[in-house]
Image: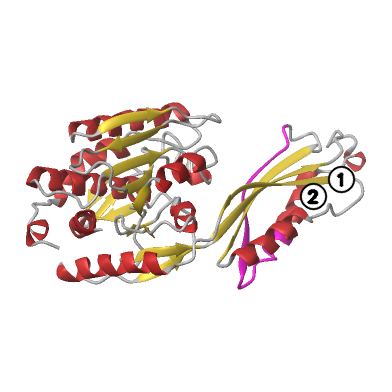
Amino acid sequence: MDQPVLDLPFDAEAMLPGLRTWVECESPTFDAAAVARVMEIAARDLALMGARIETIPGRMGYGPCVRATFPHPNPSLPGVLVMGHMDTVHPVGTLEPLPWRVEGNRVYGPGVYDMKGGNWIALEAIRQLIRAGIATSRPVTVLLTSDEEIGSPSTRDLIEAEAARHAVVLVPEPARPDGGVVTGRYAIARFNLRATGRPSHAGARLADGRSAIREMCRQVVAIEALTNDDVTYSVGVIHGGQWVNCVATHCDAESLSMAKRQEDLDRAVETMLALRPTGNDVQLEVRRGVTRPVWEPDARGMELYGTARRIAQSMGFDISSQSAGGGSDGNFTGAMGIPTLDGLGVQGAGGHTLEEHLLLDSLVPRAKLLAGLLQVV
C-alpha cells in the first residue's frame, strides 16, 4: 500500500455529524417508510461524492435499496462491492431511551454499531481516496440494503446478482470483539410456529378450553433444550391470545437455529419440521423461514484476509480472522465462492440492545483499513 493512503487526513470527530444524521433517522426493518427515509439521506451523501445513484424499489413490504456506482478509468474491470444494511432492530422511538450521545470513547445510538457506523466509515474511506486523487484498484459499487436484520428475504436475489458481477466483496459489519475480521459465518435457519388450541371462557368454562399459549410454552422449553455443541435453538418472538378472559385459540412464535456446519443445520431443520403437538387436542404447525447458508473460509477469502492483515500491520495494528455466528449478507456472497471479507466495520458492543455503542477510537484505523483495501484488492 502506498504511503499516501496512510497519510490521508481521517478525523474521528469530523465523521460524527454525518453519522449522527444517519443514526437519528431511525430505520427498523419492518417500517418500510422509515427505511426509505434513511436511504434517501444515504443516497444524497453518495451522490455528493460523485456516485451514480440507483434506488431499487422494495418488495414484500420492505424498504428500498440504494446502489451507488463510482466512476473508474477501467469501468469494465470486475469491481469491488461494498455491501451493508441500513435497517436496524430498533423500533422508531428508541432514540428516547438510547439517544445519540458521546461519552468518552463511546458513541451511542440505535444502529450506530450494527451497522450504520461501518457503512459510514466505508463511505469516508471512499471520500478520502477521491479527495486525494488516489485511484481504487477496481471500480467500486456500494450496495445498501433494507432487510438484513430479518434474514434478507426480499434482497437475497439482488445481493447475489450484484455480487456475481464483482471480483471482491467487502462487508463493514461490526468487527469482532478483538478487532478481528470475519472470513466465514455459521449457517442460520428461521422457523415460524403456530399452536392452535380450543377456545373457551376462561372464567366460566376454563376446563373446556385448550390453551394455545400453554402448548407453545411447552414447545419453547423443548426447543431450547435441544441446544448442543453443534447447533443452537432459540425462540425470540412469541405472540398469543387476545382477551385475558378467553382461553387462547392461537399462539405464534419465531425460532432460530445456528450451526457451524451445514450438515448440522440440515439436521436441525429436520428436527424442527418434525415437531409434534404434546396432545391430541391441540395442533402445531412449523414452517421453515429464511435460511442463510454456511460460509466456509476458503483459499481466496483467506488471501484477501492476508492482504487486509498486511495493510493493518503497516498501520501499526494487527487483525485476526474468525468464523463467526450471527448471520450477515456475507453468508450469501461467501457461499457463492466470491472472495468476501466481513467484519470490517467499527469496534464496539451492545448490538441489538439499549447499550449499543461504537468505540470512537476505532473509526480512523478501520476507515484507513478500508481505504487501503480499496486501493489494492
Residue range highlighted in magenta: 222-242
Report the front residue among 203 and 212. Answer: 212
- Find the distance from the CA under tag 1 to the CA under tag 2: 7 Å
Q: Is residue 185 above or below residue 101?
A: below
Residue at 52%, 29% (x, y): give it.
59
Q: Is residue 340 left or right of residue 222?
A: left
Q: Are marks 1 and 2 in contact (CB under 8 Å)?
A: yes
Residue at 62%, 66% (x, y): give it.
231
Residue at 41%, 42% (x, y): give it.
162
Report the front residue among 28 and 8. Answer: 8
Task: Residue under label 1, please give it.
Answer: 282
Q: Is residue 36 magenta?
A: no
Report crowding for label 1: few under 14, some 14 to 19, many 20 or more residues within 10 A (C-alpha).
some
Total marks placed:
2
Question: Which amino acid lies under the numbered mark 2 shown in the image of this protein?
Answer: Glu
Picture disc at residue 215: 2
Quadrant of the rendered image containing residue 187: bottom right
Where disc 2 sits, the SS reads helix
Question: Which amino acid lies under the numbered mark 1 shown in the image of this protein?
Answer: Val
Q: Is residue 22 left or right of residue 283?
A: left
Residue at 86%, 43% (x, y): give it.
210
Where in the figure is residue 204, as x and y percent of width and height? Answer: 89, 34
Quadrant of the rendered image containing residue 22: top left
Q: Is residue 257 left or right of residue 184?
A: right
